Amino acid sequence: MSSVEVRAANCGEAGHWGKDVRSDLHVAFESRERGGVEISLESRVAPYYGSAILEQTRQVLAGIGIKHGRVVIHDEGALPFTIGARIEAATRRGGMAAGKSWQAEAHPLPPASSKERLRRSRLYLPGSEPKYFINAALHGPDAVILDLEDSVHRSEKDAARILVRNALRAVDFGACERMVRINQLPLGLEDLAEVVGESPDLILIPKVERAEQVVEADRAIGEIKARNGNKRAVWIMPILESALGIENAFAIASASENVAALTIGLEDYTADLGVVKTTEGRESQYARARVVNAARAAGVQAIDSVFGDVGDMEGLRRWGEASRAMGFEGMGCIHPGQIRVIHEAFRPTGAEIQKAQRIVAAFEEAQSKGLAVVSLGSKMIDPPVVLRALKLVERAKAMGAIL
């Protein structure tokens, strides 16, 4: 069963329960003027964790200022960060706790993400489904995307942003970069207000068509960080999903020094063109080339779209290899099974690495001798070739292809 908003002004529901639901719970809240707090709990793990769930429920309600009310909980193995999020969402939907929030127990923040870090793969996780959060890091993506946009029904946007906020605070995502895809502006500003305080590493902005949209989101992020006294970087990745966005690619990529990467969403882009999206990508060749060129010109990373057919691993491999050949540094993925193939596709070959290492060695030898000309055997090596070799070696080291 899914959460539904109760029409009564003093009632609200949030979360999910049923035989196919796991790591979640359903909360029904009814506010009262007196009588204290009454809690009813149904859970398969009640003999083991029932007391803890009841105690947390009381703590959450007290923390958001609820002194009287009835709470009915159907638990399907939810962890504390989810329990808190669902209770808070239900009370807000019941007209209570406006402007108040409960803070989940904080997991130590990982090291700050660098602007140039490796972004071969980014795994999308629906922001309304906590079951996907918990073990996401075990699949080894370079990044996880807690998605508040397309994977979340419009009626669940409010509850999802609270859940994502709590996940950023409480869930260990290991070495993964912690990304959040907000909704299209202006709704995305509400997402930022909820999640930026928990220091996501990067914000994806969907359907960007003008540089001003990036500036607006960047300003909002900066204001929230300033209020919280947070100096930690929050990077931005605009998503271009229309013909107009593609035409404005460079302006968008260079709109802020906090833009770390530029990417494209091919489902919306091909829909905007009125053409069919194919596994060969001929219809998007121009747009993807524009993204790579604009990103390079702006000094940021170019990241490709997702490959939608999760059952076609050979097609994925071909797409990834073609993406790398175009100049992309990574792509999105919608299933954990795609991660390994993507990493292999974006990994330089042994022959490429060896050649690059020879060029770098020749360059370093020339530098040590004070020579302006780099030669490898009987061939002169131009500076752009040296630069490309240096980048390839550095990237291979980041991937673990070179010790």
Image (cartoon, rainbow, N blue to C red):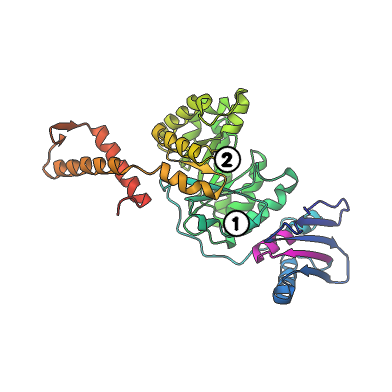
* Residue at image location 21% in from the left, 40% down from the top: 359
The stretch drawn in magenta includes residue 190: no
Q: Which residues are magenta?
A: 70-87
* Residue at image location 72% in from the left, 59% down from the top: 86
Q: Is residue 325 left or right of residue 228?
A: left
Given residues 327 and 13, the one toward you in this image is: 327
Name the image quarter holding residue 120: top left
Q: Can the viewer see residue 242 in this picture?
A: yes
Image coordinates for residue 14, horizontal then vertical, percent: 76, 56
Which is in the foreground here, disc 2 or disc 1?
Answer: 1
Q: Is residue 22 left or right of residue 228?
A: right
Q: Is residue 230 left or right of residue 387?
A: right
Mark 2 and mark 1: Cα distance apart in space: 21 Å
Given residues 235 and 344, the one toward you in this image is: 344
Image coordinates for residue 326, horizontal then vertical, percent: 41, 32
Q: Is residue 1 left or right of residue 322?
A: right
Image coordinates for residue 58, horizontal then vertical, percent: 75, 71
* Residue at image location 51% in from the left, 65% down from the top: 108
Residue hosting label 1: 133
Residue 105, placed above or below residue 325: below
